[in-house]
């Protein structure tokens, strides 16, 4: 589906491991004072000052987490960083450093790894992150990428999953379900391409949802916004697996229940139209889709006036006592238990 725009192929063997590391890492610049030593020694050195340090890791495996037949390597590099930064921001922390470990098979030429690193570099520059190390090794099968992100936060500002209180408001950032529908479109076009390689798909009606799948942005802006608005969420999580599983995580860890309002869930018009085209229910997609990398948080009702004018923050429900359970209140005012995966509108109609 993707043309090889880069016909030049330099084999990784030619370069050797150290040549490759040097080639990939020589452009990274250090921006943070807390980075005492970055790439080049046996270990990086950080100084912690008075802040708390947050650390998070993700592992991405070809054929499990990504499909290179429609994911450009540049986007993959960018997204691998976003996935990790999103976890740092979900702690209400600022991301400061990352390490990158890759395992590559010799099926990849140097030019392919350069593409991957150009996406990583763009992400690091855009989000102000130092790349401080990593590891490089060979793989007999596909590409494996593991990124560790480090961040810092004042002790009093850190937000956990377990702080939600009854009567708090449940708030989500941006809109949800788009990344999943973008993936459905890409998967469909891949199948069409297999049958008819000459066919150029018209992806124009899907630009937003495809971008949400291929090039998600972590919500650094929201952490800055919350600080500006002087709102500290009582609990927070990032939406990687779908709204319903993240709501369940927050409620279980906080020992509370929730009422989620179907008619409040923010959906982009492209999600609604694509759901219609694929004949799937948009609420089901929003609840179970995943990969949105938006933030889900609870805030005290006192803070509502500070957030209510903001189009990036939508109140979608409120927290109850644990014994009231976790329910979706549908447009028809039915209460349906929220379950982790596979909430099915059809089932309920039986
Ligand atoms: P060691 O053998 O001690 O693990 P390496 O030769 O693997 O050291 O790495 C040398 C330096 O390059 C280290 O600072 C390491 O963190 C960094 N590094 C190695 N691979 C990568 C990579 N893929 N991306 C970024 N930095 C890397
Ligand atoms: Mg090493």
Image: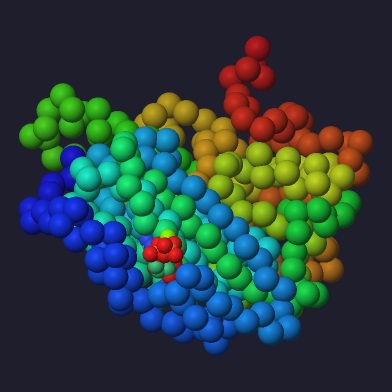
* Depth order, front residue of 113/157: 113
In what quadrant of the picture does the N terminus appear?
Answer: top left
Identify the residue shown where x is 58% and y is 83%.
34
Q: How many marks?
A: 0
**What percent of the width, then of the height, locates residue 68?**
28, 42
Could you tell whether 142 is left or right of 146 in the image?
left
Quarter of the rendered structure image containing ligand 2: bottom left
* Depth order, front residue of 265/287: 287
Identify the residue shown where x is 87% and y is 54%.
165
Identify the residue shown where x is 62% and y is 82%.
47
Above or below, 49 against 91 in this view is: below
* Depth order, front residue of 293/40: 40
**What percent of the width, then of the height, locates residue 297?**
70, 57
Could you tell whether 40 is left or right of 195 in the image?
right
**What percent of the width, then of the height, locates residue 158?**
74, 68
Could you tell whether 158 is left or right of 257 in the image?
left
Identify the residue shown where x is 47% and y is 64%.
99
**What percent of the width, then of the height, locates residue 82?**
47, 60
Q: Quarter-wise, where is residue 347 in the image?
A: top right
Could you tell whether 285 is left or right of 26 in the image?
right
Tell me, yes or no, if residue 282 can be seen here. yes
């Amino acid at each position: 589906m993707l043309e090889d725009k880069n016909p030049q192929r330099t084999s990784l063997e030619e370069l050797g491991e150290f040549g490759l590391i040097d080639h990939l890492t020589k452009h990274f610049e250090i921006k943070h004072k807390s980075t005492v030593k970055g790439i080049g020694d046996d270990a990086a050195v950080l100084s912690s000052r008075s802040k708390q340090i947050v650390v998070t890791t993700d592992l991405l495996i070809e054929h499990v987490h990504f499909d290179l037949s429609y994911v450009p390597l540049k986007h993959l590099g960018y997204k691998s960083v976003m996935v990790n930064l999103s976890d740092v921001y979900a702690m209400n922390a600022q991301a400061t450093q990352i390490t990158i470990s890759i395992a590559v098979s010799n099926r990849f030429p140097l030019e392919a790894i350069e593409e991957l690193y150009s996406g990583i570099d763009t992400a690091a520059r855009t989000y102000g992150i130092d790349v401080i190390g990593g590891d490089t090794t060979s793989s007999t099968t596909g590409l494996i990428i593991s990124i560790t992100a480090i961040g810092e936060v004042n002790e009093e500002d850190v937000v956990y999953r377990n702080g939600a209180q009854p009567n708090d408001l449940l708030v989500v950032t941006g809109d949800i379900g788009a990344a999943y529908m973008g993936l459905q479109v890409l998967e469909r076009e891949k199948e069409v391409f297999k049958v008819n390689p000459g066919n150029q798909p018209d992806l124009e009606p899907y630009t937003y949802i495809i971008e949400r799948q291929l090039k998600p942005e972590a919500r650094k802006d929201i952490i800055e916004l919350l600080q500006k608005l002087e709102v500290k969420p009582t609990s927070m999580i990032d939406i990687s697996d779908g709204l319903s599983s993240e709501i369940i995580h927050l409620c279980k860890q906080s020992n509370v229940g929730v009422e989620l309002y179907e008619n409040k869930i923010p959906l982009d018009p492209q999600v609604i139209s694509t759901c219609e085209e694929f004949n799937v229910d948009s609420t089901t997609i929003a609840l179970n889709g995943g990969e949105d990398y938006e933030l889900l948080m609870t805030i005290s009702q006192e803070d509502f006036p500070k957030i209510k004018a903001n189009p990036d923050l939508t109140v979608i429900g409120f927290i109850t006592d644990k014994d009231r359970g976790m329910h979706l209140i549908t447009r028809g005012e039915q209460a349906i238990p929220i379950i982790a995966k596979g909430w099915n509108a059809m089932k309920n109609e039986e």
